[in-house]
Image: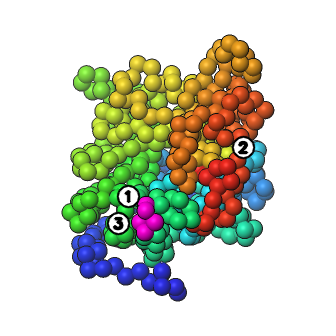
Amino acid sequence: MSNAEKYVPNAREQAFLDAVENPRYDRQSINGLTPFLEERAPEDVLGFYSTDEIDALRSLKGTERDVEARMPVKITRHYFEMAKRSPALQRLVKASPEETRNLEGAEDPGFQMDYSPVEGLLHKYEMGLMYVTSTCSAHCRFCYREELIGRKDIERQDGSVAKKGLAQIGAITDYIRSHNKLAADNGGRHPQSGREKLREILLSGGDPMVLSNTKIAAWLAALAETGVEAIRLGTKELAFHPDRFDGAFLSMLDRFHETYPDVGLRLMVHFNHPDEFLAKDDDGNYFEGASGILEWNPGAKRAMEGVVSRGWISVENQSPIIKGINDDPDALRIMQRAMKRVGAENHYFFCGRDIVAHKAFNVPIERAWNILNESQKGLSGVETHARLSITHYKGKTEVVAVTNGPIPGVPGSENGVVIFKILRNAADAPERGKVCIVGRNPDAIWFDGYADRVIFDEAGLFEYSRVEAAGSEGAVAVGADGAS
Ligand code: SF4
């Protein structure tokens, strides 16, 4: 065992950890398709899949189109109860033979591993993203971490092949301290990579909320001790099992804030559709309260109130736009309005990534832009903060606009154009604001759909190479510097 693995909390961390409670959370999760195939799932859940659906999935077992080999199946009781009344939610968690009809795609979309200096950490911009677990309470079929959740082998840039490892507190905190010291000693930027201080760290996975309160608390305290400015916790648990946000968890957060009052806490929540948090009657209609306000289901309401009532926690929703789930302007309009009303921000909507089998889930880029644009008609300014982002290898990119008509005198714009803008690069932020304009292709679901119609590319989206050295601080982008 290396020194990094023998992480020992200091007295302040230990005092915080000693007060953490760990209740047992009973999600009544159903793991895998076997309980359905062998009719061992609870009786009321068995009908979630029709006989035809089960027969079709059974016939793919053990073949290269086996849906569980692509992405493990999992659902909680809470999500099942909501999904019974929601075709969108059923599509989100139910396995379907459609998923493996076309297995094109990348096991490591955006070459994420190029930015992994330590196992379980992606270091991009001023941020670090950590894989602290490889599962969630339930599994979204469209998950763009299917390679992590499915524990698949990934080829790294040096040619080695291995499963993605999980972050270890000792190794990660050593890396943060070392990077930040070298940056500080060099006038604020790392001498080799040019990157600034690692200011913000995201606990991700998988969903950190499947870990015990003590494990989450240990991460929070250890990261706070390194001097990071903010910690993000990425979770879909408010949708999958909102009762996880109980008194014991919230008290742990309160004590964390008392112990480390300067460290910001950002809860990055993941709601895809209003059916995941609004109450519905048996006919599938939302309950409308006084003034036409739509009522939340009790569990999600309690959980959301628990976090937004703590003003020092910021709550931000982000969601991909996925075919058959939320490619629906009305649903997105309701969701953005409802989020803002309870104090959660609408952060990003995403175009899907080019994961394996992405064609089953991804909406064409121009359609996604139109859906979001339509959804924001009639919303107030503060309800429409969300932007549509698509993650290029080079960096996080916004789909700014899609035009219908030609730009006079500009060849290639006859059918209109799409304008992309770089929001951030992986190594630094020198190219923020630079744009790329391409001629329209309504079928494009990824950048390669525009490769033959680039009009203007100061952003360099179509002229880039991978970084030279996998993940090391010496990694310097060749014409670009990365993505998230
Ligand atoms: S919650 Fe996130 S990580 Fe978990 S299965 Fe869904 S998309 Fe994947």
The residue that label 2 is drawn on is 463
Give the SS element for disc 2. loop
Q: Is residue 443 left or right of residue 138?
A: right
Q: Amino acid at mark 3?
A: Gly
Q: Please name the residue shown 56% across and 53% down the image.
A: 426
Q: CA distance from mark 1 to mark 3?
A: 11 Å
Marks 1, 2: nearer the viewer = 2
Looking at the rendered structure, the secondary structure element under dot 1 is strand
Is residue 241 inside the magenta stretch? no
- Residue 466 percent across, percent down from the top left: 69, 55
Instruction: Give the magenta range.
Output: 184-188
Q: Residue at x 32, y 47 (%)?
A: 314
Question: What numbered label is drawn on residue 231?
Answer: 1
Q: Are marks 1 and 2 in contact (CB under 8 Å)?
A: no
Q: Which residue is mark 3?
A: 227
Is residue 148 in view? Answer: no
The mark lying in front, picked from 2 and 3, is 2
Residue type marked 1: Ile
Provide residue 391's location: percent of width, then percent of height.
Answer: 59, 44
Which is more toward the observer, 326 or 62?
326
Task: Kindly identify the amino acid type of the residue bearing the numbered disc 2.
Answer: Glu
Count residues near mark 1 (Cα–Cα under 10 Å), then give few for <14, some for 14-19, many for 20+.
many
- Is the residue marked 1 within 8 Å of ligand 1, measured from its CB? no
